[in-house]
Image: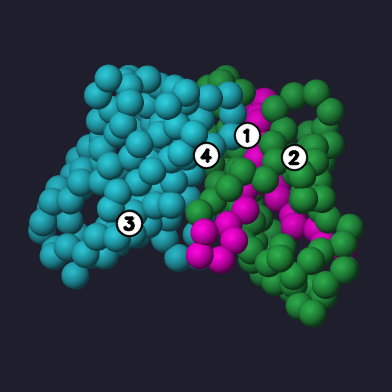
Amino acid sequence: DTGVSQNPRHKITKRGQNVTFRCDPISEHNRLYWYRQTLGQGPEFLTYFQNEAQLEKSRLLSDRFSAERPKGSFSTLEIQRTEQGDSAMYLCASSFLGGYTFGSGTRLTVV
Amino acid sequence: AQSVTQLDSQVPVFEEAPVELRCNYSSSVSVYLFWYVQYPNQGLQLLLKYLSGSTLVESINGFEAEFNKSQTSFHLRKPSVHISDTAEYFCAVSEVNTNAGKSTFGDGTTLTVKP
């Protein structure tokens, strides 16, 4: 068990560019979650998958955000036409029976 | 919709003193409750969880939390803190009808233990 792995650890991008993050969950976990965290706040829910099915997506998430989990294994989160307000830590977590195992996160800076 | 309020954003205490980090939640259905800890420069880790059964749950490093349904609270306590407990602590809630799916987090409490 190598834990939840996220890549890249850091991403700096220019406003208007597209970015993609990857998450590799714990292999036995059927659920995978994406959260966003900004300074001084708790993680904010973005979306989650059970196996390959995307079960819920936050209404706060604009159409510029999309996530996939092909074959129920790793997941990708894509942000199109990035804006400065997208700068945050993007967290991935996986779970099986309640309680998350988090990855170390991807810190996105939009300049 | 569920929500979580962590009543104290910062809690400074001296080493070996007791501490309580307060968490209140709001939900129209039954819930599961969690505490997560984030040590400096590390990721979030699950500290303890309440899913069912005994309302008092314990972690391996001496923390405990008690689910109080009537007061909709899940406060975290430790009778004697160490310098190494310095970290940010997050309370989270999931609704039972989602089978512990999406969790809603509070904004965190920074615990600073001073020598």
**Chain containing mark 3:** A
For the point 28% across and 28% down, which residue is it? A69
* Mark 3 element type: loop
Part of the protein shown in magenta: B18-42
Q: For the image shown, how many numbered marks are present on the structure?
A: 4
The residue indicated by pointer 4 is A101
Q: Secondary structure at mark 4?
A: strand
Q: Chain of mark 4?
A: A
Q: What amino acid type should be assigned to the residue bearing mark 1?
A: Ser
The residue beneath circle 1 is B27
Mark pair 3, 1: CA separation = 35 Å
Which residue occupies 66% across, 29% down?
Answer: B31
- State whether residue A35 appears in this view: no
Amino acid under disc 3 = Arg
Q: Is residue B78 magenta?
A: no
Q: Which mark is residue B72?
A: 2
- Circles 4 and 1 on the same chain: no
Picture quadrant where residue B80 is located: bottom right
Between the C-alphas of marks 4 and 3, the distance is: 17 Å
Name the mark nearer the viewer: 4 or 1: 4
Nearer to us of marks 2 and 4 is 4
Residue A28 in sight: yes
Which sits in the foreground, B91 or A12?
A12
Classed neighbour count for the residue bearing mark 3: other residues with Cα under 10 Å, few (<14), some (14–19), many (≥20): some
Colour of the chain lettered B: green
Name the side, left or right, on which B39 lies relative to B113: left
